[in-house]
Image: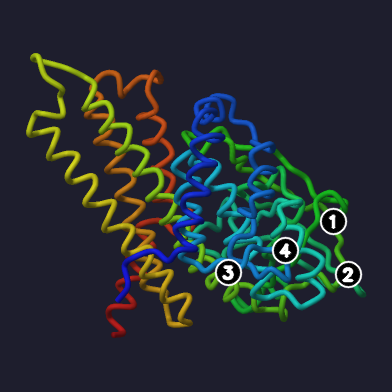
Amino acid sequence: MEFALSAEQRQIRDMVSKFVDEEVVPVASEIDHDDEFPADLVDEMAELGLMGMPFPEEYGGAGLDYHSYAIGLEEISRGSGGLGTVVAAHTSLAGNMLYEFGDEDQKQEYLTPLAEGSDVGAFALSEAGAGSDVPAMETTATKEGDEYVLEGNKLWISNGSVADTVTVFAKTDPEAGNKGISSFVVRPKEDDGFIVEGTEEKLGDKGCPTAELRFDDLRIPEDRLLGEGGEGFVQALKTLNGGRITIAARGVGIARAALDEARDYANEREQFDQPIGEFQSIKHKLADMDTKIQAAKLLMHKAADKKIRGEDYIKASAQAKLYASEVSREVANEGIQIHGGYGYTKDFPAERFYRDAKLNEIYEGTSEVLRNTIGDQVLEE
């Protein structure tokens, strides 16, 4: 068992870390305050190859393994949780749908610009009445000649208002349950009937627009179908399994940022004629925070390793996402506690880390759903 990073993985980590420290951290509070899509940073990440990290070079990607991708996303999320979601939704969800289920023409036409970063991707699965219960979706895609006509609404779509390519799930056979769901490539700037109803005002995850979408007589050619009809539900589950590794990475990155800020504050803040870090209670908090982060990183890399090896990683990715999500919130909470009253103000980033961390327990599989997934896997072993 190898725990050391390879030379290439260290190089990726150092490169992304340098970019984050120089370009992201200085504007992170501004991104959080303004809640505007950071297009300039996305362009810079595209130039560095960070918008297509796990995809082959033949499709414009960087050709990195999933360990390197998780490391890169961890660093990006350390700088900004919202930027981490932008990259994860673009790459792990929209891009991966095309890579795994698109035909060669679809990969060349739609995946390549995503991997190169000239296009932004989104993944439209959730609806107001269909979050964890995917088969309850009401969006339909009706075949008419050589076209599909999409009708319906999607909710909670990360990057939804800025995306150039959206992978959309809809019912092609409403009577077939989860076997009647298919997936499609939608191009918002080309397809009439793609409507952005608005974006959510969220607790955290600022800078990543979360949109409500409506499809009104949206007509797309039949060659926009991904894979075979009726395969959408299975495609979504497989895609989310991989995406959970990157949400674990986002959790680890936010937790690291919270720990770094708490440690620095504990070394600088004095009470009773000594830095508060000298008090045992603070040392114990920092010790627990760091230990949890290290454990979360191991689970993240274990899941990435199984994915790379082609092994079943359903349980591993669920455990990595579940644990890292809860650790990120716990560590961010302790970071506020170490800051005391200052941690409850916007003068310090501690409160931002907490707001960004909470989302990890909700999207791409709530903690409750993931516990069911893990429990089912345990019972089958």
The residue type indicated by label 1 comes to Asp
Mark 3: amino acid: Ala
Mark 3 burial class by Cα count in 10 Å: few <14, some 14-19, many 20+: some
Q: Check contact, mark 1 vs mark 3: CB within 8 A.
A: no
Reading the image, the residue beneath label 4 is: 60
Q: Quadrant of the N terminus?
A: bottom left
Of badges 2 and 1, the one in the foreground is 2
Of badges 4 and 2, nearer the viewer stands 4
Q: Which residue is mark 2?
A: 147
Q: CA distance from mark 1 to mark 3?
A: 24 Å
User: For residue 184, which quarter of the picture?
Assistant: bottom right
3D distance between C-alphas at marks 3 and 2: 22 Å
First in sequence: mark 3 vs mark 2: 2
Q: Residue furthest bottom?
A: 381
Residue placed furthest toward the front: 7
Q: Nearer the viewer, residue 48 or 193?
A: 48
User: Looking at the image, is 257 positioned above or below residue 48?
Assistant: above
Query: Where is residue 97, by image quadrant?
Result: bottom right
